[in-house]
Amino acid sequence: MAPDLPSQAAPVRRLPQRRLPPDVPHMAPTRSLRLQTLGLWLRAHQRPLWWAQWAVVAVYAVLLVVPALLPLPGATARVWSNLTLFAQFVFWGLWWPGVLLSVLLFGRLWCGIFCPEGALTAFASRHGRGRAIPHWLRWPGWPFAAFALTTVYGQMISVYHVPQATLLILGASTLAAVLTGYLYGREKRVWCRYLCPVNGVFGLLARLAPVHFAVDARAWDACAPDRARLMRFNCEPMVPVRTMESAAPCHMCGRCAGFRDAVTLAPRLPGSEIVTAGARTATGWDSLLIIAGMIGLATAAFLWGTSPWFAALRQAVPQGLAEVGLRDLRETALPWWVLASRPGWPGGATVADGLALSAWLAGGAALLSLLVALPLALATRILGRWSWPRFHHLAQSLIPVAACGLILGLSDLTVTLLRAEGLAAVTGLRLAVAGLAVAGSLVLAWQIARQSVAPPWRRVAATGAVAAALLPPLGCWGLLFGWW
């Protein structure tokens, strides 16, 4: 049954138009008022949104399960005539790139209103045991660890191309979300808050969004106690709303809109949160996810399928195993749920293939991370004495480029499938998207550097060092989309 969501909030009324936040002084007042109204609309229509969320769950289940029950498509199959290819195209070619883009534009609206795992874990939490959340589950490194493990395992079993692999990874993730909600939920999305593999990525991308729920702490405190007791809402992702200064954990569900006349959906300049609040909210785990995860590991994962360097590595590993007396590993086959065979791998996937792919992913991620982190460290030092908070702040200027890499990498499947239909000509679009991402990162780097007390020439030099940090991922995109 649907939760009694509307009863958790006070009667909806139109808020008086409030002064815009200081970081968006030139935004039109009418736009601010429209966004406030939209926020209140979200709050007033929780039940229809609940049904929309379960409709997404149904579509998700069909795309996840049905292709895994069908035979693999033949060489002559096409997207518009084969259900497996069509589901693959919709799921990986449109759905996931579209989700990432939506987070950049609207914050984590996907998480709060449409995410199927979010709906299922929230449902389980309302009917579960409500145990105390264990300490290990609150470990702040889970967003990076879950992203890294899912990315590596997904590449090993070819999650983008094998429907059974998609069902294995995403099905296991969905079951884990339901189990977490059942054990620890208490009407909260514990899975989404701590363990979701894309929680960290979505949180970083949401900091760029041009809209957010702004909180006026003075209005919150000024609300009359008698009236405040009549106003209630359930924040499922467990965000401390009164002190919220980052859009990273907020699911944009709208339940808190209008609370104490202090919470409003408001416009802001894209990336303004990173500039104004990044120094306080950035952490080392954020930097690790940006540099080693979204740029390093993800780029290596997108490259290996077309890389001649990986092909050479795959030939060299069996020779190395033979030299150290491990000849049998060259022909020892692995089950598909450990390593899936690829076209051009006669005889199936072997231990040697698994070692080659593991070495590529680990080595590529480490090399790219080092090539990005060193210029970033130089930029930090140029602006003054070494400071980890400043390093983490500058690392957030790379989010536009890191996000662009994920979107372009995932959309490569879209392009591949459309080219088979004779429909794709996207080189110019890719260049435009990449250029926009680079410009966004450089603008953020310059604005962060301007906050330093260093002389102007040092700020310019630091921005140039950040520009050098962008060259490795740009070079990889050139290899993937042009030279290979």
Image (cartoon, grey):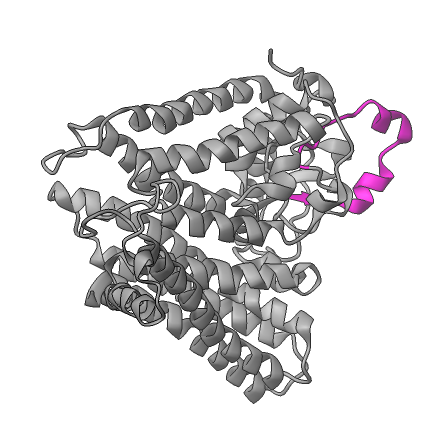
What x and y, as percent, mark residue 437?
40, 62
The residue lying toward the viewer, choosing from 434 and 287, is 287
Taking depth in this image into account, of 306 and 341 the one nearest to the observer is 341
Q: Is residue 215 magenta?
A: yes
Residue 2 x, y percent position in the rendering:
60, 14
Q: Residue at x 64, y 49 (%)?
A: 20
Identified at 17% across, 30% down, the residue is 80
Query: Position of 176 compared to 160: left or right?
Result: right
User: Residue, x 57% and y 63% (percent of image)?
Assistant: 288
Task: Spot the residue most to the right.
Answer: 225
Location of residue 15 with respect to 214 vertically, above or below: above
Residue 125 location, quadrant: top right
Residue 106 versus residue 234 in the image, above or below: below
Residue 433 visible here: no
Location of the N terminus (image quadrant):
top right
Which quadrant of the figure has residue 459?
A: bottom right
Query: Magenta segment, which residues?
Result: 213-237
Instruction: Measuring from the top left, give residue 81's x and y in whole percent.
Output: 15, 27
Residue 75 shows up from this direction: yes
**Count of numbered badges drawn on the protein:** 0
Q: Is 121 placed left or right of 158 in the picture? A: right
Residue 201 position, x and y percent, is 52, 50
Please name the residue shown 37% across and 25% down the image: 65
Q: Is residue 118 magenta?
A: no
Image quadrant where one finds the C terminus: bottom left
Question: Residue farthest to the top?
Answer: 1
In the image, 108 versus 160, the foreground residue is: 160
